[in-house]
Amino acid sequence: AQSVAQPEDQVNVAEGNPLTVKCTYSVSGNPYLFWYVQYPNRGLQFLLKYITGDNLVKGSYGFEAEFNKSQTSFHLKKPSALVSDSALYVCAVRDKVGGTASKLTFGTGTRLQVTL
Amino acid sequence: DAGVIQSPRHEVTEMGQEVTLRCKPISGHDYLFWYRQTMMRGLELLIYFNNNVPIDDSGMPEDRFSAKMPNASFSTLKIQPSEPRDSAVYFCASSPGIPQYFGPGTRLLVL
C-alpha cells in the first residue's frame, strides 16, 4: 500500500527566508508525487507534480520540489517566503504501477506560517 | 473554466435529517472524487467514479452514505440519516487522470 508522511505539523519561517516543507513516501513501484496548497475555507489547489524526468520540479507561485528516490522524499521548497504563502501544504502520492488509476494518498498536511 | 463547483457551501442540519451535497466537475474530466476532511483524520477518500461509474467506494464509512453520478456533469453525495460525527468539510475533485482539481468544499455541521 502507498503512504505519505509529513513529519512536521507546522513550519515557521520569516518572510524573505527560504522555506522547506518535508514529505516522504512509500510505494511499491515508481511514484507520481504531488503538492497541494490549501488556504482557509478553500479547497486544495494543485501546486506541482513529479511524474518522471528532472528531479527538480518547478510549480506555481515560485515553489519547487526535489524528488529524491534514494531517500524516498519529495520536499517542497521556495527560495524566499512571503507572508501570503501561509497556508496548509499537503503532499500526495500515487503508485504508477497498475491498479486503480487516479487514487491518491494524501499526507496529513503541514501548516506553514510566514511572519514579518 | 469555472472549476469544480460544489453546493451548498455551508450546511447546518439536525441529527437524523437527510443531507445532499452536489458537485459539478470540470468539463471533460473523466474522474470524480468525493473526500471528507476533518482535523483528526485529514483528507479521506470516500468514493471515486470513472466515466460516471463508481470504481472504489471502500472509503464510504457506512450505509448511511451513498453517492451517484447520473451523468458526466453532476454528482451527489447523500447522508441519510445524518449524525453529529459526520460534521466535516466535504470536497469534490475532478481529474482528466492527473492531477486532481478540487472544489471549494461544503462545510457540514450536524447538530
Image: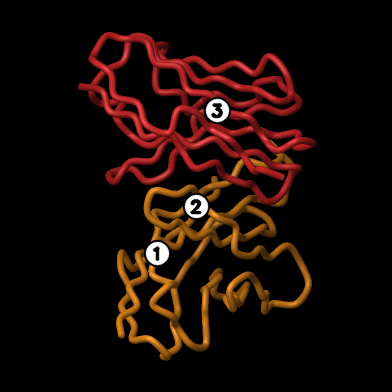
Chain colours: A orange, B red
Please give the residue where the numbered disc 1 appears in the rendered image: A87
Q: Kindly report which numbered mark, 1 or 2, lies closer to the viewer in this rendering.
A: 1
| Residue in view at x 70 percent, y 34 percent | B31
Residue A3, numbered circle? 2
Residue A115 point in image, percent of width and height: 30, 81
Residue type at mark 3?
A: Ile
- Precedes in sequence: disc 1 or disc 2: 2
Q: Nearer the viewer, residue B57 or A63?
A: A63
Residue A92 point in image, percent of width and height: 54, 55
Secondary element under disc 2, as helix, strand or loop, is strand
Q: Disc 3 versus disc 1: distance between alpha carbons?
A: 26 Å
Q: How many C-alpha atoms fall within 10 Å of the one at disc 1: few (<14), some, or many (≥20)? A: some
Secondary element under disc 1, as helix, strand or loop, is strand
Q: Disc 1 versus disc 2: distance between alpha carbons?
A: 22 Å
Q: How many C-alpha atoms fall within 10 Å of the one at disc 2: few (<14), some, or many (≥20)? A: some
Residue B90, compared with residue A21, is above or below; it is above
Please give the residue where the numbered disc 3 appears in the rendered image: B47
Circles 3 and 1, Cβ within 8 Å, touching? The answer is: no
